Amino acid sequence: MPRFAANLSMMFTEVDFLDRFGAAARAGFKAVEFLFPYAHPAGEIKARLDEHGLEIALFNFYPGDWDAGEKGLAAMPGREEEFLASVDQALEYARALGVPKLHLMAGLADPDSADHRVRYVKHVRYAAERAAADGVLITLEPLNPYNVPGYFLPSVAHVLDVLAEIDRPNVKLQYDLYHAQLTDGDITHLTEAVADRIGHVQLASVPERHEPDRGELYYPYVLATLDRVGYDGWVGCEYNPAGETTAGLGWLDAYRGQS
């Protein structure tokens, strides 16, 4: 049975970030994930995790100037020093919070550029080698071109291609079913094909990116397929609630006791 982690960057936004940990726990979640922790001292976040008995599934490396539209540094020219500093920062937080997985964002760069490709592979390998010393898994996530035009990894197929070149045991696919349906489709066969490369899973309805009991994907079947292929990690609920967060959690009732 799947185990669900609330994404605190998108869920429970009715309250301030540090108060979302308690809100998630009261709603029945046993784990959380979020985009970026860096606006808060690691000790404050750790205190909330401990207070509410929550695990942390994953967060992202620093992405550059998020408010200006930047989506990562790993493939970006002229950002090497900033990228290296972001690895130090992410691993420092990972150690403090006990997070097992970190998502490394690539950035807005041409996926067909050999220069960007060489830089990206080099940087992912560097981050992976640093993370391996702490037992941390690095995940790479494709972002669909409708929501994030120009992203370096626009499909699952692109991620699989670079994973083959990177060739590090602690670098895997962040399998966001929302993005995958929009870019690759054929989710059942795709899930079977990528099962051994999956490092983390996220979900949302397609195309609205709301609760998973809406939209074109039938998640009871999709989640059963993930069970069948052997995925037993957290499933991140990276969706925008259609209304108030707790009012939309009826879909979770079938899985109570598992999340």
Image (cartoon, rainbow, N blue to C red):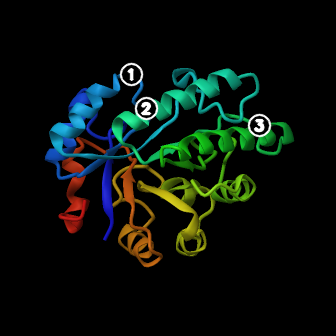
Depth order, front residue of 78/156: 78
- Residue 202 position, x and y percent, is 44, 54
Q: Identify the image quadrant of the N terminus.
A: bottom left
Which corner quadrant of the image does residue 93 belong to?
A: top left
- Which residue position holds label 3? 119
Residue drawn at the location 67% of the way across and 35% of the way down = 74
Depth order, front residue of 222/57: 57
- Which residue position holds label 2? 36
Please state which of the two labelled residues, at mark 3 or mark 2, is closer to the viewer: 3
Depth order, front residue of 178/62: 62
Instruction: Tell me the tag on residue 171.
Output: none
User: Which residue is outermost to the right?
Assistant: 114
Residue drawn at the location 34% of the way across and 37% of the way down = 97
Depth order, front residue of 33/99: 99
Q: Of callouts 3 and 1, which one flags the residue occurring earlier in the amino acid sequence? A: 1
Amino acid at dot 3: Arg
- Which residue position holds label 1? 39
Left or right for 189, reference 51: right
